[in-house]
Structures are given as structure tokens and as C-alpha cells.
Image: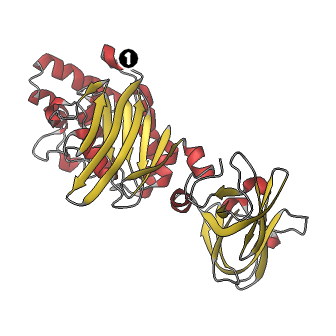
Amino acid sequence: MVLTQAPLHLSSSQAMSTHNLELVNIYKRYGALTVLDDINLNVRAGEFIAIMGPSGCGKTTLLRVIAGLDGVSDGQVLLQGQDITALPVNKRNTPLVWQSFALFPHLNVRENMAFGLAIARTPKADIQQRVQEMAVMLNLEPLLDRRISQLSGGQKQRVAIARSLVTKPNILLLDEPMSALDPHLRVRMQGELKRLQQALGISFFYVTHNQNEAFSMADRVVVMNQGRIEQIGSPAEIYNAPATHFVAEFVGNNNLFDGEVVATSGQTIHIRCPLGIIQAPMRQRQHPVGDRVTVVVPADRMAITDGSPTENSIKATLRAKEFIGSQVIYFLETNTGQEIKLIQQQSLNDSLRVPINAELELVWQIEDTILLGERGLRNE
């Protein structure tokens, strides 16, 4: 998909508003089941937000609430500062691109793109102009007269997005729109979708279970669990500084060790774990002696010792290796039965070509240790 800069005229309210979408104390209940639990989130104008979380955490329900397909039990949905909580779907202009694209097979590409405008009784001349503008931007001109059955998966995705954007929405909602694409096309479309969003300058609200998609495209990532928001931050913040025990387990490849603070010296905290003493930086929050904590060590921050003095180290037995292109994942087991992951760049170094069942010493630096408190919150 080649993006061509075509004129897209945004409304004055889009240009002036700082917060495009505001979710205020959103609850969604089905009887005794709470699906969304006190959701608060502001989406800035022109911001790409990705929502991540396990199946059943409330991601799609949140999307449906914003779109108006589901009502809220409590709370407010504000768009451009206006309360749209009670507005029906056809009054919101918050189009949703479905996982299945939901295109009309009996209409050609042009008619699919024009459908929303025709329903809104837009003058025919305006429909033609807007469809042409969006077709130019998404490189769909050669496909306008094709049937949907004649399109590839990537082409269908572009048509579904174009059909939503042609109505000039304040925000575009996307529900795992790349899950039906093959892996190679999915990676290519990530870059195309991000460039499209930047060219248009509107907010994208993107639901996905794929961490690579979220991290590669989003300005901010929202991690959900059991209907609640666990953490909001940039992809780097989410990956490098998980705020809760759940985020540390869900995002990236982290190793977690439970332990107890036994001493502090200067800006260093000493934690006794079943594997020995681990050192962590003090940072901002104090942890008195006796405090129960969880130590988080990213798998790509560990290394196999080269014999140099180390600040942190543990011993484990290599059980398996997994080759993933430029990297190798090592699966190790400690004498307590805990699995440890180590991620290394592929190397010809003999120290990395170790046999299965070999005992290794893994090392890492103090500053690469993340500390979560007893209640699962980061040491900050």
C-alpha cells in the first residue's frame, strides 16, 4: 500500500481539541459479572492508542462501548468534549473496523466505500469526491470497480479502513484488523497503517493481543486485565518498566523471583530469594527490611558469565533452545524447579553453543533489576 497525500479536511473541533476521546469511570456489568471496572482513559487528538490484554479482559467490550454498540452501566464517554454516552451508533461517527472487515460482498469497492456516506444522505457529488480522495490516499483507484471476492486479504483491509475514514471520523476504532493476514503481510501492514494514521492526523484506537503490533505502531499502550487497566505508557515504558506483577508476566520475556528485603546499602536493596541474594536499585520507593517483593529481570538483560566479577548471578541448567532468527531463547531450570529464560543475539561465540543439561551461571547488572512491591506495584 503506497500512501499518497490527498487533501483531508478536518473539522474545526478536531483541530482545536486536545483530548479527542475521554472515558470517565466506565463500568460495564452483566448481572453480577463486571466486564469493565472503573476505566479512565484520555486519548489525545492524533494519538495512536493500542489496547492489549489476554482474552476475556474486556478489550473488545471497551471498543463496543466507544462505538455505541454496547451501553455502559456507569460512567461517561466524551468525544471532542461532548457527552455521547447515550448517543446511538449512527449519531457518533466512531466507525469500527472489524477483525473480519465486514465488507458487503454484493457491492464493489467503490460502493462499499460510499456506503456510510449514502446512509447519511450525503450529496452524490460529495460522495464521489470523498471516495476518490480516500482511494488516492490508500492506492485503491485501480480496485474501485472490483468485487470484494476479487480482493486479497490486504486489499480487503484497506477497503474496510477506507470505508470508515471516508466519513471523516474524529477517531477510528480497530478490532484486531490484522489477525486474518499472513505473518509477512501483517508486518508490512503495520508500517502502512501507522503512516496512514500519521498522514491523516486522527486518533486510532487499536485493540490487539499481539505485542509486536502494539509496540511497533502505538504512541501509548494500555494493558488490561480482568476489566481493569493495569498500566498506561509508551511502548518503551511498558516493556522496560512494568508497573504491576501482571504486566511483568504478560509483556515481554521477564523472569520473576519472589523474595524478602534483608538489607539496604546506599542506593542498593538486597533481596533474599530461593536462588540467593539479588541486588536491585533503590529508585524512589523505600523498601524496609522484611518487605516482601518480586524481582523482575528481563530475559534479554541476562547473559552467560564470561568469568568477570558480577553484581547479580544465579545458576541454572539448560533444558532447551529455540532459534528465532537473529536471536536464540534459552530455557533453563533452577534447582528449585523454576524456569528461566535467557535471550541472546545469535553468535558464533563458543560460550553460547553449550550442550543441553549443562549447568550455567547467568549474570546481570543491578540497574537491570526491576522491583515490584508486595502489592504488585513497581518500586517507583
Residue at the extreme right of the image, as rendered: 308
Along the viewing direction, whichever of 340 and 168 lies nearer the viewer? 340
Most distant residue in the top direction: 12
Which sits in the foreground, 274 or 327? Answer: 274
Image quarter where the N terminus lies is: top left
* 357 w.r.t. 125: above or below: below
Q: For residue 365, say whether it is visible.
A: yes
In the image, is residue 288 above or below residue 285?
below
**Left or right of 62 in this view: 70:** left
Would you identify the image quadrant in which residue 143 lies? top left
* Left or right position of 248 against 67: right
Label 1 secondary element: helix
| Vertical relation: 107 (above or below) 316 | above
Q: How many numbered marks are there?
A: 1
Determine which quarter of the picture holds residue 110.
Answer: top left
**204 or 19: nearer the viewer:** 19
Q: Which residue is mark 1?
A: 15
Residue 339 image position (x, y, % from top left): 62, 76
Q: Residue at x 70, y 67 (%)?
A: 260
Q: Is residue 1 visible?
A: no
Q: Position of residue 59 (x, y in %)?
A: 34, 51
- Counting from the top left corner in percent of width and height, residue 28 is at 26, 50
Q: Give the colour scheme shown.
A: secondary structure
Classify 10 Å Cα crowding around label 1: few (below 14), some (14-19), many (20 and above): some
Residue 290 lies, with reference to residue 355, above or below; the image says above
From the viewer's perspective, tell me whether residue 338 is left or right of residue 136. right
The residue depicted at 33 percent of the width and 47 percent of the height is: 154
The residue shown at (32%, 51%) is: 36
Residue 241: x percent and y percent? 62, 50
Residue type marked 1: Ala
Name the residue: 25% across, 43% down.
Answer: 74
